[in-house]
Image (cartoon, grey):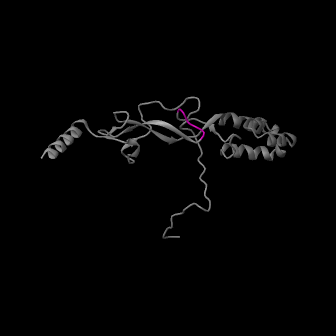
Amino acid sequence: MLLKVLFFIFLLIIMVHGAAYDCSLLLMGQYLCPEPGRNQIDPKTQQFYGCERNGLAKVWCIAAEGIECLGTNNNTFTKEMPCKWTNGYHLDTVLLLSVFTGMFGLDRFYLGYYGMGLLKACTLGGFFIGQLVDIILIALQIVRPADGSHYIIPYYGAGVNIIRSNNETFRVPRDDW
């Protein structure tokens, strides 16, 4: 009998105070990331604050109403979101360098490709064909800085996400193939 009373009191306490959840385990639709009430975009990099070299940043998220998260005792929590790590290279600067000084290789020097920049300088931009090819490759964001970072472009700007496939890529079979 005493066990039943203690169990009833335990249930009553949980119902009054609510149960706290590990919000990192919430399903899609039970939270909103990033939290719209906070400005989490760095104006210098146009990515989330704290975007690291591995392409992840911790952002504040908000759980659905009525869900209390462990650790914060409210409905907010942090979650790692993908981001594009930048190191100060602006896409518009590189494009201007490529259009106006690409024949001298200054765009490649700026990006950190010194050998290619010297080759372009000695051949006058690869006889101007290399300059035209570089303009296209930079505009499509195929050629990125040598340190592996991404270009700084506006957060809602025309960013390009290149989708690659290899032998390990799974393709869903379709009936009409």
Looking at the image, residue 105 sits to the left or right of residue 139; the answer is right
163 to 14, vertically: above or below: below
Spot the residue most to the left: 1
- Quarter of image, res 128: top right
- At x 69%, y 45%, the residue is 143
Looking at the image, residue 66 sits to the left or right of residue 144; the answer is left
- At x 17%, y 42%, the residue is 6
Camera-nearest residue between 123 and 22: 22
Instruction: Pinpoint residue 62: horizontal percent, then vertical percent.
Output: 38, 37
Instruction: Pinpoint residue 127: horizontal percent, then vertical percent.
Output: 84, 45
| Residue span colored magenta | 49-53
Camera-nearest residue between 142 and 1: 1
| Residue 139 colored in magenta in the image | no
Looking at the image, residue 143 sits to the left or right of residue 101; the answer is left
Give the overall secondary structure of the magenta segment. Answer: loop
Looking at the image, residue 101 sits to the left or right of residue 153; the answer is right
Spot the residue most to the front: 2
Instruction: Pinpoint residue 59: horizontal percent, then vertical percent.
Output: 47, 36
Instruction: Pinpoint residue 89: horizontal percent, then vertical percent.
Output: 67, 34
Give the number of callouts. 0
Camera-nearest residue between 110 and 157: 110
145 to 169, vertically: above or below: above
- Quarter of image, res 77: top left
- At x 60%, y 39%, the residue is 53
Camera-nearest residue between 114 and 142: 114
